[in-house]
Amino acid sequence: QQPQDVLRVVMHSDLRIVDPIWTTAYITRNHGYMIYDTLLAMDAKGEIQPQMLQGFTASADKLTYDFTLRDGLLWHDNQPVTAEDCVASIKRWGARDALGQTVLGFVEAITVKDAKSFQIKLKEPTGLLIFALGKPSSNVPFMMPKRVADTDPNTQISDFTGSGPFRMVREEWRPGDKAVYVKFDGYKPRAEPPSSLAGGKVAKVNRVEWRVIADQQQAANALLAGEIDLMEAPSHDLLPLLKGDRSIKLVEWNPLGNQYTMRFNQSVKPFDNPKIRQAVLYALNQEDFLKATIGDPEYYKVCKAMFVCGTPLETTAGMEDKLESNFAKSRQLLQEAGYNREPIVLLHSTDLQVLTNLGPVAKSLLERGGFVVDMQSMDWQTVVARRVKKDPPAQGGWNAMLTSWVSADILNPVMAGFFNATGDKAAFGWPNDPELEALRQRFARAGTPAEQKSIAEAVQRRVAESPTHVHLGQWYQPGATRPNISGWIPAPAPIFWNIEKGRGA
Amino acid sequence: MSGPVLDIRNLSVRLPKGGDRAHAVDNVSFSVNPGEIVCVVGESGSGKSVTAHSVMGLLPKGQLAPVAGEIMLEGEDMLKASGSRLRALRGTRMSMIFQEPMTALNPVVTCGEQIDEVLEIHTDLSFAERKDKVLAVMDSVRLPDPAKLYDAYPHQLSGGQRQRIMIAQALVLDPSLLIADEPTTALDVTTQAQILKLIAEMQQRRGTGVLFITHDFGVVAEIAHRVVVMQKGSVVETGTADAVLKRPEHPYTKMLINAVPTLTPPKREVKTGQLMLETVKLSKVYGGGGFFRKAREVRAASEVDIQIRSGETLGIVGESGSGKSTVARCIARLIEPTSGTIRVGDLDVAMLPERQLRPHRRICQIVFQDPYRSLNPRRSVGASIVEGPCNFGMSAEDALKKARDLMKLVGLSPDALDRYPHQFSGGQRQRICIARALAMEPEVLIADEAVSALDVSVQAQVLDLLDDVRRKFDLAVLFITHDLRVAAQICDRIAVMKNGIVVEHGKTTEIFAAPQHPYTKSLFEAAPGRNFQFARVA
Amino acid sequence: MTAPAASTPLTTAAVDIPAPSKPTVWRKLKRNPSVIVGAAIVLVMIFIGLIAPLIATNDPSAINPAARNRLPMAESSYRLDDGTRKTMLHYMGTDTLGRDVYSRVIYGAQVSIFIGVTVAFFSVVIGLIIGMLAGYFRWLDGIIMRIMDGLMAIPAILLAIALVSLSRAGVLTVIVAIMVPEIPRVVRLVRSVVLSVREEPYVEAAITVGTPTLPLLIRHILPNTIAPLLVQGTFICASAILVEAILSFLGIGIPPEIPTWGNIMAEGRQVFRLFPHNILYPGIFLALTVLAVNMLGDGLRDTLDPKMEKRG
Amino acid sequence: MISYILRRLAATVPVLLTVAVLVFLMLRLTPGDPAAVIAGDNATSQQIVEIRTKLGLDQPIVSQFFIWLTNTVRGDLGESFFFRKTVWELISDRIEPTLSLAAFTILIAVLVAIPLGVLAAYKQGTWIDRVVMGFSVIGFSVPVFVIGYLLVYIFAIKLGWFPVQGYQRIGNGLWPWFVSLVLPAFTLSVIYVALIARMTRTSVLEVLSEDYIRTARAKGQTEIKVLFHHALKNAAVPIATVVGIGVALLIGGVVVTESVYSIPGLGRLTVDAVLARDFPVIQAIILLFSLVYVLINLLVDLSYTIFDPRIRY
Ligand SMILES: Nc1ncnc2c1ncn2[C@@H]1O[C@H](COP(=O)(O)OP(=O)(O)OP(=O)(O)O)[C@@H](O)[C@H]1O
Ligand SMILES: Nc1ncnc2c1ncn2[C@@H]1O[C@H](COP(=O)(O)OP(=O)(O)OP(=O)(O)O)[C@@H](O)[C@H]1O
Ligand SMILES: [Mg+2]
Ligand SMILES: [Mg+2]
């Protein structure tokens, strides 16, 4: 192997779970983009383009969709990709993914027409079907062979055969150490140039190694020393260090960025009261969170739009006077709501760099806004375990927690999990808001972008009134590479086709 | 070569600041001629060892330093010799053997190797030649089966054998001077006798000059040609052995010689008091059992029968390890006997659990050998003395008053009660221990080698004290010792122990006059200076 | 039996000559430079911790995102709730949340030393009790020592990691976590002292004069454990401060809003190369303190350990 | 001897059982819920319950313990909650780096510390002694990760002599393996050197005041031989003991060092497993480390017979 054939990468975390349908973990999604392919994919303009498909046609009544696969698609075991495989994959994805579940709710039948084509019949029209199949982020509807896709959706798969541009070298996968991919020679890229997740996926290195370097400082050192070629997500505090070295290139690979959010637990006091939740909206401001965690304004953006700034659904509706740290207003609301100073249990995770500094900022702002805050620090996995507990805070429950979303996951009210307000069936936090749910149902049925936009505005107004969560600002994660690395395509997920490694340095 | 092998002239060795005197050795002069044994005697701390170490150049660096005088070894001044010159002389021209054969040999190196080392350092002989020479010297010091002992480790040898290894190692290169620093003090009487004989013999055969350090006048009488008496760092008297031992001049020498107990027991009236202590078939087996460890069994005492009446002193004598202490500790119930009966007063205490031993604890008291460890260093001696009475309910005030009386009784100032043990000398501590025992108003007193660790002069005083309290309080005393001279002085009756068995038992006078058992006979035979009549001067 | 009431000495003995009194422990300690220096530094640190509220320039957990990652001696200004602006000087710069490192380090002394001392104190006390029981009552020995062996066989840091992940991070949890693996070591030490001391003639003498078990343990055996425990205690104290730092480094220590030297460093390690002050200053305080405590321990051992004394 | 070893091995059983019970209880009483962690961000309560059932976490603790114990005794350590691998596979994969690191460290430590300690003892009270002891106290006072960062900064970044991080398997060649281990091993050995040097000094000092040292000198032996032939051999038992006890320290240090240098060893696995509440892995590792600790100390005890002929089992 030539050295320039091997791309040594440090990802944002360690690959442990390898079933991208079973988990929403981003590292697993990224793994999915390495070894799997998708029927449709989102291009740089945010439009959905055929990927594995030759193309698709919709009937005039928007109830019947016909899909045809491209020629020459092969699984990593060199078997041809069939429509049957794809249908099984869609079904498995639809059973797990939140958006998938919504969409499959509209579906009357999926039928295999022949080896290369299949048909989806809807009960009523929805603008979401095509979007969902081209969904860029977790859970991405990746295509798997039927034998794999037939695995029970609640069980992890153990067969890693895909049809993507790389295949995984199983023997070399050592969780906690590295995951290794090699170019799949049987992959037939599309002819178009690559554009975000769409277009031709041409693997230009023979081997990609995901190395685990848990310590960020050391990862940066390794990059500077040339021991690795690419760092997916160097901590923002390290950027000045990397910038200081002229040989390192910083790459804006995810133009949509990420969003910080605070989630309320509405099943226990005091956040069962919308007014108190609203007070939070008044007490906080995005600038402080962003400054404290990202620091450099180049990499963050104050953005009150719940469906991400820079997308068609961006709006400030309902949010104009909020997130301005109007402590007086916050205190006033608290008084009106009869908040009797029960402490807010704020789960604070201490081991993920991008989240660590959020807690103290929230605590400080909330306290100035009249809240009593009991910030409890723990590692992220404990937060994950704690946040699913519905018990009152005193018995191990919680009131609020902070996290971050990839913007691509929250582009509209149906796909963004935190808007789900079906009470016990909703994600942790368990909001129960029939009005909001009705709006989300309407959104799913909306046919035109204009209609979608107006419903999205209404959703945002509703959430500003009875908040399910708070958006705390948009931030961008640049990647860093050695100077001889080129061709990293901006996309909602880091992708490794088209990346080239030049000689030297 | 004519002239002395060793000639020490006006040697002074300074002590570090804060010592009890300015010089460890002060203006000392004496000499050792070829083929002569010079004994240096004197009480503990008189500077005997320091003198010896100065000769070898082995004084601890930075602590003790010769400040004046010269040490001529065959005409060469040791104080001026360089380090490497000294090293070259050690082992070849001068050698030294030490008191503790247990610790003076490196425990992790075989005996043969340790002798061989001398040859390796100082000669160019090949391994085979060296080995022959080592075996030859081992043979000459009468070590059995040298070939086998060559590969043995020191711990596999008896104390006497180890001392023989030391001697072999010192003599293998035929040095002109042998320094022996109390080489027999740690040994049994019988072994001691053998070693003394060996040294004398070797010295005669090779014509070595020997500087022999001891504090035992018996030993001096046994082997010395000339004697040097030291006191507090100075030489107070020198002369031929006969002259010094029989016609001492200096008061200090006289005092020392006076304190040597004679081997002739004084006449004693037969005690007819009440039977206070009786053991019947007392046996103790150490070890055995054990779940995770197969313990070795030691029959330390088997079927020991002894009786003591009030006012009577029974001595137990015997060599080291014969089970003397074991018997004492069983009677004091510090350990539980394996079988047998111990009747103290009218109580059989042999198998009683600790809780029921309280009456026994009052009646029976013990004084231990080591005066430095038998008092709690952290408690004032007063606290140690009143502890017992207070345990039995006496008020602190009464106990204190009693303690003051007892201090006077044992010849100490009552004001010393709130001092700590380290502020007393060994003999004074032993007095305090006796006072502590008496505070309980005991009826049985066990003294386990209570005077063995003391200098002859102090020993004599403590023996007197013990005999006096026995008389005064009509105590039954069990007196344990390995020193026949001491036993002769204080015991009414004697039990001789060997390997845990009482081999002979009877009136002191009778046993000393006509020992029956061969072991007892050999004990007497071995007593150094037994045929020597020490001067008795007032 | 006549009472020994006689007040005339039975034999004439050398009249009491007060032996030159050995230098007291205290005086010896005062002569040992490592004790002096160690104790002085420790006292200074404790003092700093005590007067932290007076000498700190800011609330150690007050954040100021606008003034993050300032270098030492930089100034920052911030707006109070009433609209006025306040300027302050950061002697040791600020961390990634704009907290004043100087104030955090000063307050950190409180927590770090508290942890060290508490861990040392409780592990010594608990270990002492268990060790005395195990050493004196042979039948208890087997059981206790097996459990202690078990605890000891779990590497200290692993146990601490596991225990800290037990409940939420907090000072108490960390203290317990560091303490548990130390206890067996103390137990072993105490037990060995008890085993050797109970063979001492003066203990046997105390038994023969009828001293009951409890006073025997307290009067005669306990005091012998004090010197080695004092020494061991200082080492435990030092290692506790260090282990706390390591736990923080691994992300499972004391929550970051409570400043300890360990977690100031742990938080600062990401920006170590650009802003070394985050590690440098708490690092100096930590190393200095641990060093001082270790020196104190070494010095104590040199003066208190009779074995050392023999060597002169 | 053989029977001693057997008895000692038998005695490790209660020790390990104690460890097993403690570790198991500790983990099961944690609030952390591996099921929630496994289920991921979007999981419903229903899914979490299902996972819990599948992992057997819904059973009473006692029966969980016995199931685990019987499996463990049979050599079946179970399967990791997170990785699609058995605990055996995971651990055996990680043993090589940790073993290499530990062995390398002990080697460095012993080679550096013992001569230093002997030297300090011989020069007791001089500046050499103070420097050595000062270094050893400092070694105890600086957290491992700080040492690590400093070494990396100087030797990897500034001087470029060694890689910043990473581990090369021994199968990839001896030289890369060696180079990749130099910095981590030195980092880890600092505290160990401090410990051993100190112990060596103390016990050599003790031995130097023994009579047989005086005997050796009285024979005219040179100081070097007195130190290394007579003194060191007698001081070996306490030194070996501290090497054995220090293994606990080493294991703690391995956790941190492997994190700093991203060495895919057992230490890093421990941290990962603890953070993820991967019970089977945590249990197995702690048990393994305890076993290693006990066995090493058994070896140390057996080594006494080599150093000291008086000791016989
Ligand atoms: N290393 C030392 N440092 C300080 N003082 C010492 C040292 N060695 C001996 N001394 C002192 O020197 C004096 C003489 O001691 P030395 O050992 O020569 O006595 P000794 O006659 O051999 O006594 P013993 O019969 O007890 O062996 C004593 O006062 C002793 O305390
Ligand atoms: N605690 C013990 N465990 C096992 N064996 C012991 C124990 N104490 C003494 N022994 C053994 O019992 C035997 C008798 O010992 P004891 O102490 O009674 O002898 P001794 O006559 O007092 O000797 P010494 O004159 O040396 O004091 C010895 O062989 C000794 O090794
Ligand atoms: Mg002497
Ligand atoms: Mg005895």
Image (tube, rainbow, N blue to C red):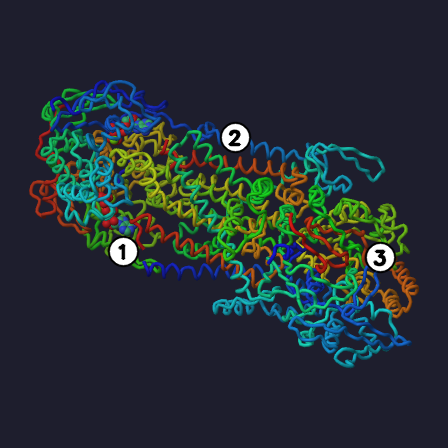
The disc labelled 2 sits on which kind of residue? Val
Say if residue C9 shows up in the picture.
no
Q: From the viewer's perspective, is residue A360 above or below residue A57?
A: above
Label 2: few (<14), some (14–19) or many (≥20) C-alpha neighbours in 10 Å: some
Asked if the residue at label 2 sits under 8 Å from ligand 1, the reply is no
Q: Which mark is residue A306?
A: 3
Q: Which residue is mark 2?
A: C37
Q: Secondary structure at mark 2?
A: helix
The disc labelled 1 sits on which kind of residue? Arg
Image coords of residue B403 (percent x, y): 34, 34
Asked if the residue at label 1 sits under 8 Å from ligand 2, the reply is yes
Q: Is residue A463 left or right of residue B357?
A: right
Name the foreground residue: A128 vs D146: A128
Image coords of residue C131 (percent x, y): 44, 49
| Residues behind callouts 3 and 2 on a single chain | no
Q: Are marks 1 and 2 in contact (CB under 8 Å)?
A: no
Name the foreground residue: A103 vs C283: A103
As measured in the structure, the alpha-carbon distance from the residue carrying label 1 to the one carrying label 3 is 83 Å
As measured in the structure, the alpha-carbon distance from the residue carrying label 3 to the one carrying label 2 is 61 Å
Identify the image quadrant of the C terminus of chain B: top left
Q: Mark 3 against mark 2, which lies toward the viewer? A: 3
Q: Which residue is mark 1?
A: B296
As measured in the structure, the alpha-carbon distance from the residue carrying label 1 to the one carrying label 2 is 51 Å
Q: Secondary structure at mark 3?
A: loop
Q: Chain of mark 1?
A: B
